Image (cartoon, rainbow, N blue to C red):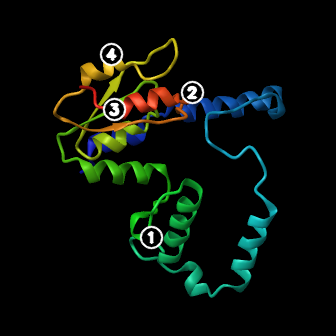
């Protein structure tokens, strides 16, 4: 027996992937140098040579058990310490390694963060336009995703609709800036207003 919801989700075609496939096909027609494909977040600049050199050095010199073995479930302590030091230095914060929870990407980070503050049946708000994969992250946790309609004039947060949709079941609000897919960054004023008490 296969879970039909999961089967349908995996069979559905992502708009992002459709755009990527279109860009690839168009590149074959008119030359890839004439296509600006912003559908996927692939790198558009070369990786610094120092990074490549360090990766080669690690592969050649590091103990293979250390290099390829599992890390602790909550992350490599040295790595977490370095991240905390970087945040403290750059943003005048006061983090320790115990505040850092590494994930393999944004999908894992969002999924963990949402699960940490909700229980099945709770509601999560986000703002249109939004990254379509929020849907499976949220519904897969047994939550309801509600989307605040876009302010199509500025693509800042539509606060009138946002305040209308706030209710006691809302346990989290996903704010994505710069926005994916619009590319618009929320202004300082928008972010301050979003973080203030609506009452």
Q: Residue at horizontal 46%, vertical 60%?
A: 103
SS label for mark 1 = helix
Residue at the extreme front of the image, as rendered: 92
SS label for mark 2 = loop
Front residue of 9 and 151: 151
Q: Are marks 2 and 1 in contact (CB under 8 Å)?
A: no
Q: Are marks 1 and 4 in contact (CB under 8 Å)?
A: no
Residue holding disc 1: 97
Q: Residue at horizontal 74%, vertical 30%?
A: 36
Q: Are marks 3 and 4 in contact (CB under 8 Å)?
A: no
Q: Is 88 on the left-hand or right-hand side of 33? A: left
Report how far apart the C-alphas of labels 4 and 2 lie in the structure.
Answer: 19 Å
In the figure, residue 96 lies in which quadrant?
A: bottom left
Residue at the extreme top of the image, as rendered: 153
Report how far apart the C-alphas of labels 3 and 4 lie in the structure.
Answer: 14 Å
**Residue 3 horizontal/vertical position (percent):** 26, 46
Residue holding disc 2: 184
Q: Quadrant of the C terminus?
A: top left
Q: How many marks?
A: 4
* Vertical placement of residue 9 versus 159, above or below: below
Which circle marks residue 196 in the picture?
A: 3
**Residue 138 horizontal/vertical position (percent):** 31, 41
SS label for mark 4 = helix
**Residue 105 horizontal/vertical position (percent):** 50, 54
Q: Earlier in the sequence, mark 1 or mark 4?
A: 1
Report how far apart the C-alphas of labels 2 and 3 lie in the structure.
Answer: 21 Å
**Residue 39 horizontal/vertical position (percent):** 61, 34
Q: Label 4 crowding class (10 Å Cα cut-off): few <14, some 14-19, many 20+?
A: few
Front residue of 92 and 134: 92
Which circle marks residue 146 in the picture?
A: none
Which circle marks residue 160 in the picture?
A: 4
Report how far apart the C-alphas of labels 1 and 3 lie in the structure.
Answer: 29 Å
């Amino acid at each position: 027996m296969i879970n039909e919801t999961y089967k349908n989700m995996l069979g559905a075609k992502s708009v992002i992937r459709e755009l990527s496939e279109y860009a690839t096909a168009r590149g074959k027609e008119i030359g890839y140098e004439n296509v600006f494909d912003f559908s996927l977040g692939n790198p558009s600049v070369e990786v610094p040579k120092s990074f490549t050199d360090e990766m080669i050095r690690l592969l050649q010199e590091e103990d293979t058990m250390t290099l390829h073995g599992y890390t602790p479930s909550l992350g490599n302590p040295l790595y977490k310490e370095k991240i905390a030091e970087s945040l403290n230095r750059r943003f005048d914060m006061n983090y320790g390694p115990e505040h850092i929870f590494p994930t393999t990407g944004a999908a894992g980070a969002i999924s963990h963060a949402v699960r940490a503050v909700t229980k099945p049946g709770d509601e999560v708000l986000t703002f249109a336009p939004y990254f379509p994969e929020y849907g499976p992250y949220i519904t897969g946790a047994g939550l309801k995703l509600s989307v605040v309609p876009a302010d199509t004039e500025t693509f800042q947060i539509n606060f009138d609709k946002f305040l209308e949709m706030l209710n006691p079941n809302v346990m989290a609000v996903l704010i994505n800036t710069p926005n994916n897919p619009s590319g618009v960054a929320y202004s300082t004023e928008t972010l301050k207003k979003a973080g203030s008490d609506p009452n």
